[in-house]
């Protein structure tokens, strides 16, 4: 049982750090409140859909930035969609990067757009690694027969 308590502590610490470091905001806490016995994997399912969205949108943005001439309106549409998608899972740092990105689309600043895309890709991969670790801890706790408390 000590093993489970250790894992639970690790999980709490990791989740707290994700909030403290700004990866997550209150929207993620709202998602967790929607998870219950009837939908025990709700959060993982929503976040996994966000991963798929992210990969698709980031790839679309990268491709669009290589076009000549660049269709800034199209890129802006992708960024707008990504901002909504990241907001819905509480991915604060990703969401916040979409703001300057959209400004660069508006001013048709290619260099700014490319830089923002690189930052987005970087932030997304950090977030994904953090989430994967979080979910792995949850699986281990579940496998050990424990339950995982959510942060209030």
Image: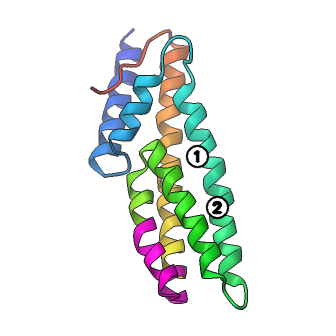
In the rendered structure, which disc, 1 or 2, sits on the residue that comes first in sequence? 1
Q: Residue at x 49, y 25 (%)?
A: 138
Q: Which residue is mark 2?
A: 57
Q: Main secondary structure of the magenta part?
A: helix
| Depicted 90 relative to depicted 97: above or below | above
- Residue 79: % across, % down: 55, 66
As drawn, is 138 to the left or to the right of 21? right
* Count of numbered circles in the view: 2
- Residue 67: % across, % down: 72, 85
In the foreground, 128 or 53: 53
Look at the numbered disc 1 and give the secondary structure of its residue: helix
Residues drawn in magenta: 98-113
Label 1 crowd bin: few (<14), some (14–19), many (20+), radius 10 Å = some
Check the picture and name the quadrant holding the C terminus. Answer: top left
- Residue 129: % across, % down: 51, 48
Q: Which residue is mark 1?
A: 50
Q: Residue at x 68, y 66 (%)?
A: 59
In the foreground, 20 or 43: 43
Label 2 crowd bin: few (<14), some (14–19), many (20+), radius 10 Å = some
As drawn, is 68 to the left or to the right of 130? right
Q: Residue at x 60, y 32 (%)?
A: 45
| Depicted 109 relative to depicted 126: above or below | below
Q: CA distance from mark 1 to mark 2?
A: 10 Å
> Within the image, what quadrant is residue 10 found in?
top left
Look at the numbered disc 2 and give the secondary structure of its residue: helix
Q: Residue at x 53, y 40 (%)?
A: 132
Residue 86 lies in the magenta-colored region: no
Check the picture and name the quadrant holding the N terminus. Answer: top left
In the foreground, 76 or 19: 76
């Amino acid at each position: 049982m000590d093993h489970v308590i250790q894992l639970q502590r690790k999980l709490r610490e990791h989740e707290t750090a994700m909030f403290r470091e700004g990866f997550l905001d209150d929207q993620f806490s709202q998602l967790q409140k929607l998870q219950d016995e009837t939908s025990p994997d709700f959060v993982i399912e929503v976040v996994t859909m966000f991963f798929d969205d992210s990969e698709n949108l980031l790839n679309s943005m990268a491709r669009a930035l290589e076009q000549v001439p660049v269709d800034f309106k199209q890129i802006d549409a992708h960024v707008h969609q990504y901002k909504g998608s990241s907001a819905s899972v509480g991915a604060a740092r990703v969401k916040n990067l979409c703001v300057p990105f959209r400004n660069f689309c508006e001013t048709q600043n290619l260099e700014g757009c490319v830089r923002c895309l690189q930052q987005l890709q970087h932030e997304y991969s950090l977030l994904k690694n953090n989430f994967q670790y979080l979910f792995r801890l949850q699986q281990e706790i579940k496998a050990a027969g424990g339950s995982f408390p959510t942060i209030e």
